[in-house]
Amino acid sequence: MTTGTDTRIGRLAGLFVRFLETNTAPEGLFTDDVFLDLTLPQWRLQTRGRDELVALRRRSHPARGTVPRHRVDPTPTGFVMEFEESWVDGQGTWYCRELMRAELRDGAIGEASVYCTGDWDPATRAAHAKEVNLLRP
């Protein structure tokens, strides 16, 4: 059975994927004062407000890409989303894998903590493919 919460979370997850692929925040995805806490392998960044969050995204991922896989699990106050991104620039195809805990307020994401593997450049992707056989994509 699908509940209203499942529908709302599915809609927000879809909007978030669109945001990742276009670098433009769709209406209704984030609250005006959304707080982002982004953890990278050796760095941590925070923003407050939709405009700051979008600006950080555009600085860190200027090329548009795709989200080939994602999974969403509801929590009592929002959802957790596991996702992968892929994009191409002058150096070739890049990749990253991330996990986000999203807290909802007023039907939108009001707070998000994102944990990222860091961006794997083409050389890192090639070395990984040579050394590791993944059991699942």
Image (tube, rainbow, N blue to C red):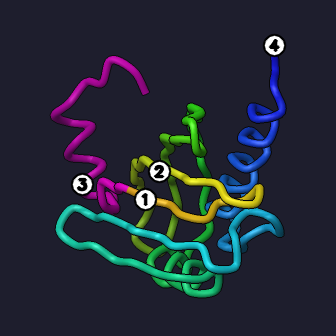
User: Mark 2 touching mark 3, by CB under 8 A?
Assistant: no
**In the image, is residue 42 above or below residue 3?**
below
Report whether 82 appears left or right of 2.
Answer: left
What element does badge 1 sit on?
Answer: strand
Q: Amino acid at mark 4?
A: Met
> Disc 2 versus disc 3: distance between alpha carbons?
23 Å
What element does badge 4 sit on? loop
Q: Nearer the viewer, residue 88 or 69?
A: 69
Label 3 neighbour load within 10 Å: few <14, some 14-19, many 20+: few
Q: Is residue 43 left or right of residue 61?
A: left
Alpha-carbon span between mark 2 and mark 4 = 25 Å
Mark 1 surroundings: few (<14), some (14-19) or many (≥20) residues within 10 A? some
Looking at the rendered structure, the secondary structure element under dot 3 is helix
**Numbered mark located on residue 124 in the image:** 3
Amino acid type for the residue under numbered disc 3: Thr
Q: Which mark is residue 100?
A: 2
Give x and y (percent) for residue 14. 74, 47
The front one of 88 and 135 is 135
Label 1–label 2 contact, CB within 8 A: yes
Please state the horizontal and vertical placement of residue 11, each as a whole percent of the image. Answer: 79, 45
Amino acid type at circle 1 is Ser
Label whose residue precedes the other's in the sequence (2 or 4) = 4
Q: Are marks 2 and 4 in contact (CB under 8 Å)?
A: no
The answer for how far apart the CA atoms under marks 4 and 3 are is 43 Å
Question: Can you tell which quarter of the image residue 122 is in?
Answer: bottom left
Give the residue displayed 54% in from the left and 52% down from the top.
Answer: 102
How busy is the neighbourhood of tag 2: few (under 14 within 10 Å), some, or many (20 plus)?
some
Task: Read off the residue under disc 1.
Answer: 113
Asked if residue 123 is among those painted magenta in the image, a careful observer would answer: yes
Label 4 sits on residue: 1
Q: Which residues are magenta?
A: 115-137
